[in-house]
Image: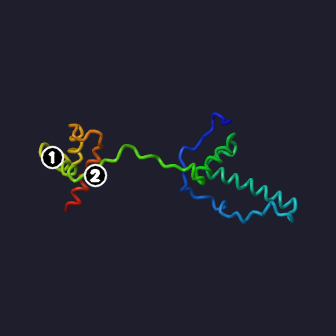
Amino acid sequence: MCSKKTKIPTLPNSRRKHNPLLNYPDNTPNKLAEHMSDIAIDKAADLDIEMLIVLLKHYNIGIRDDDRWLQLSYELAYEYIPAFKYEAQKRGRKIKWTPETEQQLIEHVTKQKKVKPKHSILNACEELIKNKLYAGIKATTLHNRYKKIKASSK
């Protein structure tokens, strides 16, 4: 069972740069070769332990942690096993903009700017949300859509 201190990673971090020592598997002698002496096998085992310590350090796992091997297995699974990889879901539903709704946005922002001419476009969008014309949509979303519509109409 896991101890209470178990730190299970929440998201994979596949963009980590690996320690160069981990990139050369051919440097370690083959432990299964029949011609290896006991000394060579001991050296290979020592090298394996060193490589595991490098892996622990690479994933910022304490060498003396009780659950270090569990943490290491999770980290490796998140990085290399497709079933463990996932992406954060986007929040909210995508807004469907039609030419009519885009035109309405332009008209509403223009009308709001006439009411308060010193306000910026973003402030006008915030006022539209306060007036519940575009409830549930962020002001920055409206502002970005307004800019996109204006840019495409030029």
Counting residues from the start of the chain, the first of labels 2 and 1 encountered is: 1
Q: Which mark is residue 39?
A: none
**Quadrant of the rendering where the C terminus is positioned:** bottom left
Tell which of 89 and 45 is nearer to you.
Answer: 89
Tell which of 64 and 24 is nearer to you.
Answer: 24
Instruction: Spot the residue most to the top.
Output: 4
Q: Residue at x 20, y 37 (%)?
A: 131
Element on which disc 1 rests: helix
Amino acid beneath label 1: Lys
Number of the front mark, 2 or 1: 2
Give residue 95's position: percent from left, percent from top: 31, 47
Amino acid beneath label 2: Asn
Q: Is residue 74 left or right of residue 102?
A: right
Q: Residue at x 20, y 48 (%)?
A: 105
> Mark 2 highlights which residue?
144
Q: Which mark is residue 113?
A: 1
Q: Is residue 91 left or right of residue 74?
A: left
